[in-house]
Image: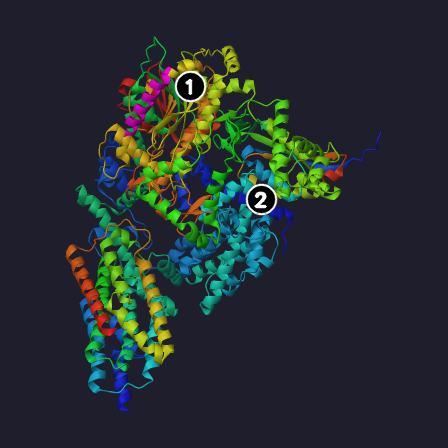
Amino acid sequence: MTESIIILLAGIFLPLFPMSMVFNAVIESIKHAWLRAVLFVVWPLCGLSIVLYSKVVIPAWVLPLALTTSALYALRMLSLREVNQWNGFLATSLWSLLWLAAMQDTSEILLYSYALSMSAPLVLLVLLSAGLEQRFGAAYTELYSGLARTIPRFAGVLVTVVVAAIATPLFPTFFIMLDMVVETISATPFAAMVLLFIWLLWSWAGARLIQGLIVGRASDIKIVDMNFTTISLFSLVLMALIVAGIYLSGVIL
Amino acid sequence: MSLSVGQRLSIRSMIYVASEAIPFFYPMRTFIHHNPLHSLEDLPFEQAVQEGKRLFHGRVFLRRQDYQHYMEQGKVDSQDLAAQVAAYVSKREPIPGIDLQQWLQALLTKTEQKVVIRRNIASTEDVQRVINNQDLKQEAFSPDSLLPYLRHELLEDRPVYDAADALYGTEIVTELDELVIKSCLDFFDEGQSVWSMPGRRRGFFQAWRKVANRNIRLYLRGMHIKDILAVDDTPEGVIAHVMNALGIPEERWVDYFTRELAQLHGWSGFIRWRWNAKNYYWSKRYPADLIDLVAIRLTFALALLSERQDEWGFKDIATSALELEEAIESKTMETYLRYELHGKRILPAMAKRVEQTLARRNASQIDKTFNEYVTYKRQHEARTQADRLQMLAESINQLDALRALSADEFSDLLGSLLMFEFSEGMFWLRAMEAHAIKHLLTGVNITPPEPRHKRPFVQALFCIDTRSERIRRHLENAGDYQTYGIAGFFGVPLSFMELGKGSEKHLCPVLLTPKNLVLEMTVADAQDVHAVTALEKAMHELKESVLGPFVTVEAIGLLFGFDMLGKTLMPQTYNHWRKGLYRKKRSTHLLIDKLDREQADSVLRTVQRAVIIMAIEQDFGLEAERISDDMVRELRETALGRNTSAPKLASVLKLNKQQEREFILRLRDNYRIDAAYTQLQMERLARIGFSLDEQVNFVSQALYSIGLTKDFSRIILLFGHGSTSENNPYESALDCGACGGNHGLVSARVLAQMANKKEVRRKLLTKGINIPDDAWFVAALHNTTTDELSLYDLDHIPSTHIFYIDRLRNGLLAASRLCAQERLPTLQLKPQPREPAEAYREVERNAMDWSQVRPEWGLSRNAYMVIGRRSLTKEMSLEGRSFLHSYDYRLDPMQRLLENILTGPLVVAQWINMEHYFSTVDNEKFGSSSKVYHNVAGRFGVMTGGLSDLRTGLPSQTVLDKGLPYHEPLRLITLIEAPLEHARRAVESVVTVKNLVLNDWIRLLVIDPEKQNVYTYNNGQWNAQSLSDAHEPLVEKEYSTQ
Amino acid sequence: MKNLNFSSVKKLEIIISGEHQAYATDLLDNAGVTGYTIINNLSGKGSHGFHEGHLMFNEDDVLIMIIAAVPEEIVTPILEGLDPFYSEHSGVVFVSDIQVTRAVKFRG
């Protein structure tokens, strides 16, 4: 009995539907970008701590629920236009898959690093959408297009971050996903199929997001592009992520 | 529901009238420069461009920043601009404390963005309050005030599905366009695809209908095309059905059709052209017209709308004009919010709120959000407008004056600014033209040329093309050369059949249909070149077969790889080497004289005999040696019905009567050796060549029109021009427009041949032209990409002239090199000076490099057309920007020659000028954007990406340089050297040109060499000034009388 | 002498600018008209002013007249069909009664 309660509690932080709605509601209500960024880092760690500290044995029904949550949010992402909402949904979708990793007897330290590497690009995206809000008033696709023309540096960073977030190599999330698929394919092939499907949905949603912001006819209004310091910082973090990804690949595979 | 005949015909007419606004799209094999707003030339330029903007949603002037950029470069006449502003100001009510002239000047020169923005919610009073740092009045905003706005935006001038897209984000337009384009690509393919659409012979609509009825994909998507198509067999019936279902009243049908056609104006233009080109092979075979297109488009539109409605289900979207009206009337707030959101106008900060509210569809919440949004927007609009006004005011220290205005005065000021910005483009355009006119007038030389003592070494006739201007200058400097300008087809419209080709090319402006056919024949014995050309053909066809790629890559893939490496890494060397592999083209002879009956008979006989021999070889495998002449003659006579049997063949092959008869029948049906067809061919043969009188007339006309009737030099060169480039669908655009998009060599050869004939020269004497016996016309070609000047048909030249050829060749080479040297900096990434010989080598590379998107600039930067003697412009460099037509008014007392020049070459030049103008001001809408993304469609046009409208106009690489305009968009500045009355009479008798002048499509100047005055036609009247004060145009006089 | 049978048909004379020739003949074809005659290079005066007749360099600027003999029942449909065109363009259509001897040629 207590087991279920602990799981449900953890389900707020490692999102399981319907507790997943908490996170997204919280994110929506917070206006301050840095606070949001911190939340993105801390949230799954809380969930993981609950699970690992209580040493609870994760029951079998969590698997289908986690997969369903992940798939549901991935699907919903496709029609979202507001970037912060999109980000939150992607986070939900990603973090619920951590249940699978937890069920596969992955080491503690590895689990925490999974959570961190999943969240890292999302945090960057939070900062970028703050940048969009500052320049345009809202981070919203299909309202202002042609960013590649008007603010090319920003656009470049944005594309890279989105690509990192949706589990593209050589970023860490890719290897994490790959590992999960490989692990489940022999035991529960259906789960592997669902994982691949979710992954596909992320890519599709990522493409739509980019399409709604980067390409298209540029407006004539002058927008301030990213300055040199910011772009260096972003590039540094992205580089570090790639290194982490390569390192992680060695560890996992 | 079936339509009456009258209704059907009426719909056909409506679509015809609607389609007149869509410019023709000529297949790119012969690219024709034309004015995209040609159908609007009845309107004054200023009005026409506004109408064009409405129809095609394109910019018709450059952005203010671009004009400001030109101003910095000194290309804008500031005095003229100031005068125009002053004229504008004088027509407005003065506003106390505001120096409107100063304001407007600052607006033009110092601000980059538009100052006046469009406001729907905030009132002028609100703006004023913000400027004065006061709060906005708290007033309730009634949604009814938005009704006119919504009606205008959604109901007028907008197809129903487009309005639905703007309200519900249904993205019907993109899908509709895609479906229509796919249908077009399927039907209009001209041999590019290997599998073709079935049933095309029945016509576009019928063939499409058959396929669409069975299209499972469409059916699965829930698009019930079948139901719509079941209503009527005819396209007109379907159109009527859909239009009624959409609820469009009949009086608005024509405008609606125009809008539909303009959406994909490339394809519409192509179908329109194709239907008009009755002799076009594909048009005859697979007929299609715009009624079909509209029917297909409307069917898809209705199907998509219904499908979306089913999809949205309970959310009930408006899918007809009536439903739209109802939505606007009864659910105004919701409709407004929807339009803001999906019409991409929404203020970002409230985007998510609005989206969520609309998703929930709760009436009270919509009400609340609406009011919030409107308040927010009101603030935003007032703030934005106030900011822009303030910035402008501050830049001229008039902020206090602005704040001091009363409500009415403020409103006046905004009104004046708004109207000014609306007509701003014309002001800039006129100012730029004023500068260009000044530049021209300061350079012209009115003093008549000194009479010559000896004949020039060589006289050369070039096309009026702007690229000739450069080479003419350099040639004149290279020695004692005299050059003339004449239309590129030398005034001889002809249809040309090249050696070995089966089709004719029209070598004349598209406005004409040539009546004479010229054949190219070999001089030497016919040797079989089939082997080499067959290999060529096979290699290309292998690329096209579906299975080909798999086989080819294995078999000869390496060869292609080698080819690609060579072309890419060492274009020049490789191309030279490769050309050597092909058999050199044999020297040919042009048949330009009419055949007499005997000759025609003989030709036909020869051809038929060759065909019969081939038939025997094919059908029976008999070797050539065993086929005797008698046998062939017998067969021929039998096939033509003059004999009853052909025993000779039968005996050799041991055929029985039946087989013999069958062969004869095959000869008649398959090989067309029969009496009726023979008659037809004789008629066709009668088209060949020109009669002696025709030849005399053409030569005389050509020489008179350029003013060359005496003092002929020993050698007279006729330069046609053409271009060379690799991998360039726009290749034909760089060739000669006067020759219908082909090169001009053939026309040159024809005229040269005519002018060299003794009989022609004898008759020319009666017309007052005395060509001395030692004068010889030589055809030549100017390659505008490499500036190479090559001579042709030298084997006919009299031996006395051989000595001069060497000197001539040296002169030509020098001119080529110097011209290349002048041109090269414009083509380099970073202009670096080069020696002439080096430059000449470098430009040659452009012609061979398949990655070169800009082999030459072509006609970009064209601005002037000068009709007059060369002495007028000889001293100045026009930088390759001018069309030059030689003309001597003294030889033309009845203005007939001038009329000819106006009605032909001038119109062609205007078309070229307008094509460049619109492709420059909006390369996305009127031009074809970047060549890099072009894909050839069906062999006649290009699309951007995988699926798009057929691109019209010029690509960005032709008119833009690094994103900024390279071509200066100006209207053609036409200068005629003749007495004013003379020029006026000529212009007035040519209706087209008269309209162009009256409606300001061209800027007309007349230089009167006798009175030494220049007359400028401006705003309906002629302004005179003496040539010596030409650099101080009387601007006050020009603009004050309005 | 053979007996000639006269039948009544209507004659249409369509005066139109040369550039619209294809449109007009297409319309007549669609209406089921069996044949027509075209006269070129006309000059005349209309609400737009006097129109010069001589053949230009440009063949589109001339007036032409298309004459067709048609059965009575298709006169109204043809006029109905031409109506949207003539609302925007200059030219006229004359309808008159004529008689022909070989009626079969004119009935589609």
Mark 2 and mark 1 in contact? Answer it, CB < 8 Å: no
Residue B808 drawn in magenta: yes
The tally of labels here is 2
- Vertical arrangement, residue B356 with respect to residue B782, above or below: below
* Left or right side of B726 for A172: left
Camera sees residue B870: no
Between the residue at mark 2 and the residue at mark 1, the CA separation in whole angstroms equals 43 Å
Residue B705 drawn in magenta: no
Q: How is the image coloured?
A: rainbow
Residue furthest toward the top? Answer: B453
Residue A230, quarter of the rendered image: bottom left
Q: Nearer the viewer, residue C69 or B575?
A: B575
Residue underneath mark 2: B285
Disc 1 crowd rating (10 Å Cα; few below 14, some 14-19, many 20+) is: many
- Vertical arrangement, residue A98 with respect to residue A157, above or below: below
- Vertical arrangement, residue A187 with respect to residue A173, above or below: below
Q: For the stretch drawn in magenta, what is the main secondary structure?
A: helix
| Residue at (35% x, 81% y) in the render | A187
* Left or right side of A68 for B13: right
Q: In which quadrant is the C terminus of chain A drawn?
A: bottom left
Q: Position of residue C58 (x, y in %)?
A: 50, 29
Task: For mark 1, name the chain.
Answer: B
Report the span colored magenta.
B803-822
- Name the amino acid, label 2: Arg
Q: Nearer the viewer, residue B263 or B575?
A: B575
Q: Position of residue B180 (x, y in %)?
A: 48, 53
> In what element is the residue under mark 2?
helix
Residue furthest toward the left? Answer: A229
* Left or right side of B855 for B26: right
Q: Position of residue B36 (x, y in %)?
A: 42, 39
Residue underneath mark 1: B706
Q: Nearer the viewer, residue B819 or C54?
A: B819
